[in-house]
Image (cartoon, rainbow, N blue to C red):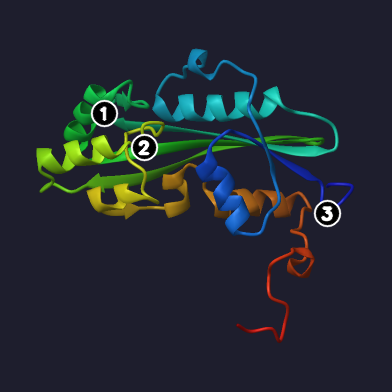
Amino acid sequence: MLRSPHPKLVLASTSAGRRALFEAAGIEVSAEAPTCDEASIIGENPPATAQARGLGKALSLARDGAIVIGADQVCHLHGRVFSKPRDATDHRTQLRALRGQTHTLSNGVAVVHDGGVQAWTTDVHVTLRDDLGDDEIDDYVACGEARDCAGGYRVEGLGARLLARVDGDQFAVVGLPLFEVITVLRRLGWRPAPLSHKPGLPLQGQHS
């Protein structure tokens, strides 16, 4: 159990999407770049790779008095891993291969704290539309979005137009199963700071 209900939360990630999830939920985190070489961490399968990388990221920033959250996402289909596109050509190739297919996003998460480590993997299944034309894919690639995303699309942006279905935690599509993370934090004794302490939020009785 934590000594304080409001310890410092550290997100071992430079992902703007993951940080935005915490911010939207009113949870204060300090986002820092992990110091491990995640590309060198390879598991026996895509989910194992995601979990090992999430754990490696969290452990690389572990410190006393803080809870460090590490996460990694691996996009895969029939054993093939779809990484961040190397260039526009690779981007188009990936999206065409995923078109009309249901692929898996494996999210490896680790929470490292004074009392130990908790790590797990959450899978979510995403189906790209089967009627996407090559011109639509080319247009999406040209817009420049999702060059830094596994699979080559950003569901919380223009990439939503490419998707037909999401089965599972939609937060996990962005890169973090937020509900599960909050559950783990609460089991440790963490509680969010009162909303009345957050500037910019309307207090009771204030309406625009």
Q: Which mark is residue 91?
A: 1
**Residue shown at 47% from the left, 19% from the top:** 43
Image check: 55 left or right of 156? right
> x%, y% of residue 138?
18, 36
Quarter occupied by the C terminus: bottom right
Q: Of 67 and 122, which appears nearest the observer?
A: 67
Mark 1 and mark 3 residues within 8 Å of each other at the beta carbon: no
Q: Amino acid at mark 1?
A: His
Mark 3 and mark 2 residues within 8 Å of each other at the beta carbon: no
Other residues around mark 1 within 10 Å, as few (<14) / some (14–19) / many (≥20):
many
Mark 2 and mark 1 residues within 8 Å of each other at the beta carbon: yes
Q: Amino acid at mark 2?
A: Ala
**Residue shown at 22% from the left, 34% from the top:** 95
Q: In the rendered structure, which disc, 2 or 1, sits on the residue that comes first in sequence?
A: 1
What is the C-alpha distance between the residues marked 3 and 2?
36 Å
Image check: 169 left or right of 98? right
Q: Which mark is residue 5?
A: 3
Q: Amino acid at mark 3?
A: Pro
